[in-house]
Image (spheres, rainbow, N blue to C red):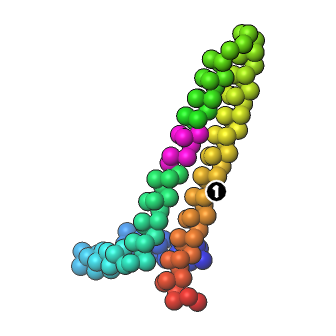
Amino acid sequence: MRGKVGLVVGLAAGYVLGTRAGRKRYEQIKTQAQKVWELDPVQNQVSKVKDFGTSAALAVPNALWDGAVKITKAVAAKGSAGDRVDAGVAAAQKSKRDIADAATVTAEEAEAAAKKAADDIDEKLNGGK
């Protein structure tokens, strides 16, 4: 499905870049591309991607901030210097795992969202075939 969309986009880009038909044909293609861009299904996907991008962009910084707070609290807690260092190291290791998990989840969600968007557009273009 994604291959079909990619093929169509590639062919269109190659044709636009390689055409010798002149400015008139370029303007026709540009007008058609603008019409497709303004279709409701395309704009719905654009909106979904914007929303996802906003939430995904915040996931990792939030994990970083939470980790920094946990480490600071662990190091500032009462106890001997050795206990505080041990607590700080343990908090740092947990924070590292949390940040890695947040990045992995974000990447997986981005991949799934991109695949769904490509499938939705492909379905709209092919009429559900």
The residue depicted at 46 percent of the width and 53 percent of the height is: 54
The front one of 16 and 106 is 106
Closer to us: 90 or 18 = 90
Please count the marks in the image: 1
Dominant secondary-structure state across the stretch colored magenta: helix
Q: In the image, which residues are magenta?
A: 57-63
Q: Is residue 43 left or right of residue 103?
A: left
Q: Is residue 63 visible?
A: yes
Report whether residue 14 is seen.
Answer: no
> How many C-alpha atoms fall within 10 Å of the one at disc 1: few (<14), some, or many (≥20)?
few
Residue positioned most to the left:
24
Residue 71 to residue 94: above or below: above
Where in the figure is residue 84, as x and y percent of width and height? Answer: 71, 16
Q: Residue furthest front?
A: 78
Q: Which residue is mark 1?
A: 108
Please say if 24 is above or below 106: below
Name the spot of residue 51 as percent of width and height, x first. 46, 59
Which element carries disc 1, helix, strand or loop? helix
Q: Position of residue 6 (x, y in %)?
A: 53, 71
Q: Quadrant of the N terminus?
A: bottom right
Task: Write the residue at 60% across / 23% down.
Answer: 72
Q: Residue at x 42, y 66 (%)?
A: 47
Q: Vertical placement of 39 versus 13: above or below?
A: below
Residue 126 is one of the magenta-drawn residues: no
* Residue farthest toward the top in the current orientation of the protein: 81
Kind of residue indicated by mark 1: Glu
Q: Quadrant of the C terminus?
A: bottom right
The residue at 63%/29% (across/down) is 70
Q: Nearer the viewer, residue 109 or 72?
A: 72
